[in-house]
Amino acid sequence: MKTILTSSEKVPLISRNVKQKFYTVSYYFIAVILLVSGVSKIINPENFIKVLNVTLGFLGENIIVLTATALPVIEIALGLMLMLKIKVKEVLIATLLLFSAFALFAIYGFISGFYVDCGCFGTVLKNEFGILMIGRNLFFVVISFYNLKFFNKQFAI
């Protein structure tokens, strides 16, 4: 088996290739998730606005409208920047923060007992607050963290 030399240890070449492929697939997976989520919220914002009113109604209508308008644009911008490989490290950090906020929001909704469709993907997918929503968002956090860690390791100057 061929090996390559890294910082004091030998790593099998096949293992490095698998890690690179996983990084590439998960990197574009994140980009697609962001694009689909953002576009679906723009196409059909009703579910998303409804869940914001139910869960965060105490913030006021102006904040809810601002959030419902800005979040899809941010998701699309991050997804496009990943696809076009613009400021990748910064975008991966922003994506990790965004998915972490989504995970916390899912936990908050579940603990608070909100049983509404979150509108996370417009009407493309039905997603109610619950363990599956928390798990999905935590999965996105882990994948984002992996991508950031792998990117730093591979492309650090």
Image (cartoon, rainbow, N blue to C red):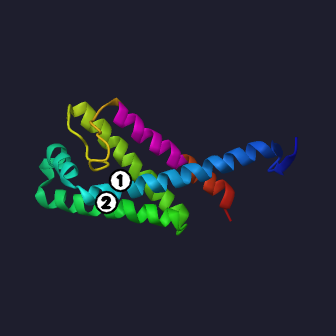
Seen from this angle, which residue lies furthest right? 1
Task: Please say if the residues under marks 1 and 2 sit with CB atoms less than 8 Å apart.
Answer: yes
Range of residues picked out in magenta = 132-145
Q: What residue appears at the point 75 percent right and 42 percent down from the top-left corner?
A: 15
Label 2: how many Cα within 10 Å (few below 14, some 14–19, many 20+): many
Judged from the image, the secondary structure of the residue bearing numbered disc 2 is helix
* Quadrant in which residue 60 is drawn: bottom left
Residue 98 is situated, as x and y percent measured from the top left of the image, at 39, 53
Residue 3 is situated, as x and y percent measured from the top left of the image, at 86, 46
Left or right position of 56 against 70: left
Q: What residue appears at the point 38 percent right and 55 percent down from the top-left corner?
A: 36
The residue under label 1 is which amino acid type? Ser
Left or right position of 46 against 40: left
Residue 30 is situated, as x and y percent measured from the top left of the image, at 48, 52
Residue 22 is situated, as x and y percent measured from the top left of the image, at 62, 46
Please name the predominant secondary structure of the magenta segment in the image: helix
Rendered position, 84 above or below 96: below
Label drawn at residue 72: 2
- Residue bearing the label numbered 1: 37
